[in-house]
Image (cartoon, rainbow, N blue to C red):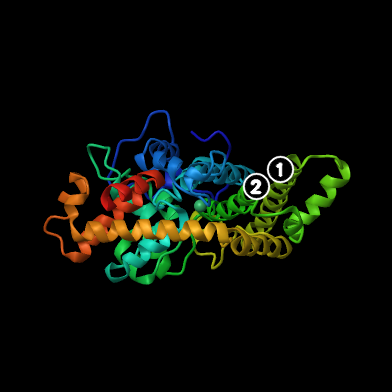
Amino acid sequence: MQTVSLASYAADEALSRGRRYEEPRASYRSEFHRDRDRIIHSTGFRRLVYKTQVFVNHEGDLYRTRMTHSLEVAQIARTIAVALQLSEPLTEAICLAHDIGHTPFGHAGQDTLNTCMRDYGGFEHNLQSLRVVDELESKYADFPGLNLTFETREGILKHCSAHDAKLLGDVGERFLQRQHPSLEAQIANLADAIAYNNHDVDDGFRAGLLSLEQLREQSLFETQYIEVHERYPNLEDRRLIYEIIRRMINTVVTDLIDNTRRAIDAAAPQSIDDVRKAGKTLVIMSAEVHEQHVSLKRFLNEYLYRHEQKLAMTRRVQAIVSDLFAAYMEDVQRMPLQFSQATTRKDESGRARVIADYIAGMTDRYAIAEHERIMA
Ligand code: MG
């Protein structure tokens, strides 16, 4: 059902390592298309609309949310996958699901929940994304979760400790054997960073937290600034910024495609297993662009994510998450029946995990409303 011919080292659905529960094949969709469609129909995916990327949902209507972030990641990754004759639907499925286990309130939410879970195995949003698609979505009569293919699950799990890898079975193996995932997964991973680096410049500028002068100290930005400014000297700031951003994305993506092509030629993998055993990732940028990309990432970390205005919000949301966690630990009946019942006959650690699943699934505004209700 692929319309373009795939490279021999692409993920080929005919050679898929399959689903956890066997199912008859779909008549008009490939297995990876089906994975993508199941993700789009999932509850976890819909919740991303109201989950923070950088700006808390109620701070403004035009900022990225986890949902629009995921769509931008998918859009960037699909271009790269097609250019390299890799599986576009698999790449898209991995991108759409990559943040499906994210907590409300972005990284502040994730870090706080991790602290709350310190004595109970911790909380990690990437691992949670796999948990959502494997176990927590309950929609289908025949199996728990979305029953996705191995290749999509492998792509969702970006990193994992040796301890967790042992518990995860097939998708954990590569971390113990020091192998890499498919090229489709490697693309999704880098497209994530390309997407946020660029949309966070846009959002940070829109919010007035980043200035043109500051951004111009970044060579990735400055190179495009000079070109755009020379060609359109009278462009107003908003259009100027966006024109620069689209050129930055194009620069990084083009560089990535060209360099990955070279890396693939040099390693000459014949199959997806050769990719997994290549000993290094093959989806790469040139050293120069990579350095600029990393520099922009560091810049955003320092000036946007840790901006005083953001930190004030961070402290507020930390209190919300830790208050909720403590309140449910004290009395599980404060959670909806489905969750309080799930704690029956569980030890403290098991109860904490159910609570973490419940909190992680909340949207920003639901968490705020629950907090107000419980603390009233
Ligand atoms: Mg992401």
- Please name whichever residue, 332 or 257, is drawn nearer the observer in this view of the structure: 332
Q: Is the Cβ of the residue at disc 1 closer than 8 Å to that at disc 2? A: yes
The amino acid sitting under disc 2 is: Asp
Locate residue 37, reporting x and y percent. 42, 36
Q: Residue at x 35, y 48 (%)?
A: 367
- Please name whichever residue, 183 or 105, is drawn nearer the observer in this view of the structure: 105
Residue labelled with disc 1: 242
Residue 233 placement: quadrant: top right
Mark sitting on residue 20: none
Q: Is residue 350 left or right of residue 270?
A: left
**Which numbered disc, 1 or 2, marks the residue that appears first in the sequence?**
2
Locate residue 246, reporting x and y percent. 70, 44
Mark 1 and ligand 1: say if the CB distance to the nearest ligand atom is below 8 Å: no
Q: Is residue 95 left or right of residue 204?
A: left
Q: Residues within 10 Å of mark 1 (few under 14, many from 20)?
A: some
Between the residue at mark 1 and the residue at mark 2, the CA separation in whole angstroms equals 7 Å
Residue labelled with disc 2: 202
Q: Is residue 9 left or right of residue 340?
A: right
Q: Residue at x 25, y 45 (%)?
A: 144
